[in-house]
Amino acid sequence: MKGCFGGCLGRIAALVMLMVLVAMAWRFGPDLAERFGDELGRTDPSAPRSSPEMADAALARYLDLADGDQAEVSFSDAEVESILRHRLPNGLPPGVHDPLVHFHGEEVRLTVRVERRVLPSISELETVLSVLPDTVSVQLRGPLVTTGGLEAALILRRIDVAGIPVPGRFHGQIAEGVQSDSSPELPSEAISFPLPPGIESIHLQAGRLILRVAS
């Protein structure tokens, strides 16, 4: 169940944050603190809806699927969030925490808090970093698709850092930065990840994450 909901998500978030800082520093320079200080300090108002009990119930259904007792299983966004928060403590890397998961139709919205300390030291960003709070919210939006073989992909359609959209022209660079290679059948802004063992496809339908076993 880790896939892109684990370490891949954390690497994306840190790189997203770095890319948007570079873009903002280039465009606004010393005026950044005055223009965006309030926005950078904002937190996501969404409250976690997760619980250890919900995580255990969801994982039990996944194990039934893995054992061949079912052909498919579906999860709500709250169940996926519960698994991330309560049953995959090492799923997110250090400095990336508080995952929020929301499904809107066929779109995934993943939000995490990224600590400023996980960003690499770049002298050109010193002015920008000095106005940031200790942690900043990063949200990724996009659909899930299943590719050929044993992979799926998250297509980056929108990225927000502290509520500020990252220009779409950076999405391909962000995707490239978190994977060694990409499938030629996917757009440049796609981030691929391996499917869990025995799973043939993963997709969203009617606000639920659906996993199907290989036939």
Image (spheres, rainbow, N blue to C red):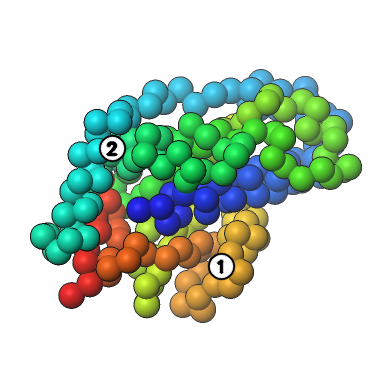
Of circles 1 and 2, which is in front?
A: 2
Q: Where is residue 107 in the image (x, y as percent from the top left)?
A: 36, 50
Q: Is residue 128 above or below residue 152?
A: above
Separation (CA) of disc 1 from disc 2: 33 Å
Specify few, some or many for label 1: CA neighbours under 10 Å numbering under 14, 14-19, or 20 or more. some
Q: Position of residue 213 (x, y in %)?
A: 21, 66
Specify few, some or many for label 2: CA neighbours under 10 Å numbering under 14, 14-19, or 20 or more. many
The residue at 37%/34% (across/down) is 86
Is residue 73 in view from this perspective?
Answer: no
Three-letter amino acid code at disc 1?
A: Ser
The residue at 37%/72% (across/down) is 150
Q: Position of residue 14 (x, y in %)?
A: 63, 45
Which one is nearer the viewer's eye here, 52 or 81? 52
**Which corner quadrant of the image does residue 125 belong to?**
top right
The residue at 37%/77% (across/down) is 149
Local secondary structure at mark 1? loop
Which one is nearer the viewer's eye here, 160 or 101? 101
Residue 2 lies left or right of residue 23; in this view the side is left
User: Can you identify the residue that label 1 sits on?
Assistant: 188
Residue furthest to the left: 69
Is residue 57 in view from this perspective?
Answer: yes
Local secondary structure at mark 2? helix
Chain-order first, disc 1 or disc 2 = 2
**Screen quadrant of the C terminus:** bottom left
Q: Is residue 163 above or below residue 92?
A: above
Three-letter amino acid code at disc 2?
A: Ala
Which one is nearer the viewer's eye here, 94 or 112? 94
Which one is nearer the viewer's eye here, 178 or 85? 85
User: Can you identify the residue that label 2 sits on?
Assistant: 55
Q: Is residue 97 above or below residue 208?
A: above
